[in-house]
Image (cartoon, rainbow, N blue to C red):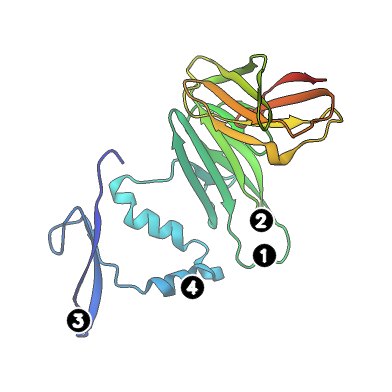
Amino acid sequence: AGSELVCSRQEMDGAAGNRVAVYTVNGAIPPAGSRVFLANADWGRYSALRRTPAGADLRRRYADEVLGPWGIAPVVQVLSPEGQPMPGMQSFRFVKGAAQFVGILPEDFHAVEERLWPAELAFPEGHLYDLRRGRYLGRHGSLRRDLRTCEPELFAILPYLVSGLHAESPATEVTPLGQRVTWQGRVLAAGGDAGEQHVVRIDLKSPTGELLLPYRRTVWTQGGGFESSVILPLDPAPGCWALEATDVISGMQAHAWLEVK
């Protein structure tokens, strides 16, 4: 919203002689001005109402009426094909460096079967990636997507295009436990710096192609680069072992091979 907001809770005497909760913003209390709202409500009842058919739009109305005057609004809008806000939709945002990660979840407490909601998703301008499917969706600020009951959609918005994933040949050393493999690489970005906002998943595969999940590692990039090390199983089978790196945002991969004799 561009300014710091501090909320606090106090109790005051109500008209009926009872004590009611007053939530103040930035220290303002009645009758100081418009930046005060009286939360004379039972939040337990609010939670129960949210799970009724009549409460499907309650959270959005609450946010619009209480937070709207301060210019606080969701960064991502979930709209109907006609351009109207859709009730019962939750959106979540996480910011890491220059990247924004967004989750969208259709909320249906009374679903008895899967349902589809055709929706128009309005995002901040940038390069849009589908994290669940590992796809680049293009550079734009909106997307049409059929949302499914209680099935999350995950997106990343970047100010640059991920152009590749580069990895060096692995370095190895013999330790008392076995053979340690250290691998370094870099997320390549066109029109920006990959920085610290990418997660790279490192997998190890045996000569038979078996994915060894206990050896999986995930690392954040530092300055666009990453490094990971793993100790091979004791008495590893001879043959060609594979290392596979996957950029979680773009789905791009890099591979390296290690010959064990």
Residue 216 vs 127, above or below: the answer is below
Instruction: Assess disc 3: are there few (<14), some (14-19) or many (≥20) residues with their C-alpha within 10 Å of its C-alpha.
Output: few
**Marks 2 and 1 in Cβ contact (< 8 Å):** yes
Question: How many angstroms separate mark 2 from mark 3 (CA)?
Answer: 44 Å
**Marks 2 and 4 in Cβ contact (< 8 Å):** no
**Marks 4 and 1 in Cβ contact (< 8 Å):** no
**Marks 4 and 3 in Cβ contact (< 8 Å):** no
Question: How many angstroms separate mark 4 from mark 1 (CA)?
Answer: 16 Å
Tag 2: amino acid = Thr
Question: How many angstroms separate mark 2 from mark 1 (CA)?
Answer: 7 Å
Question: How many angstroms separate mark 4 from mark 3 (CA)?
Answer: 26 Å
Give the farthest residue toward the front.
176
First reached walking from the N terminus: tag 4 or tag 3: 3
Q: Which residue in the protein does label 4 denote?
A: 48
Which residue is found at the position 65% from the left and 20% from the top? 173
First reached walking from the N terminus: tag 4 or tag 1: 4
Instruction: Assess disc 4: are there few (<14), some (14-19) or many (≥20) residues with their C-alpha within 10 Å of its C-alpha.
Output: few
Residue 108, given in percent of the width and then of the height, sits at 61, 62
* Residue 83 visible in the shown view: no
Q: Which residue in the protein does label 2 denote?
A: 149
First reached walking from the N terminus: tag 1 or tag 3: 3
Question: How many angstroms separate mark 2 from mark 4 (CA)?
Answer: 20 Å
Q: Which residue in the protein does label 3 denote?
A: 15
Q: Which mark is residue 111?
A: 1
Tag 1: amino acid = Ala
Which residue is found at the position 54% from the left and 71% from the top? 52
Give the farthest residue toward the left.
32
Q: How many marks?
A: 4
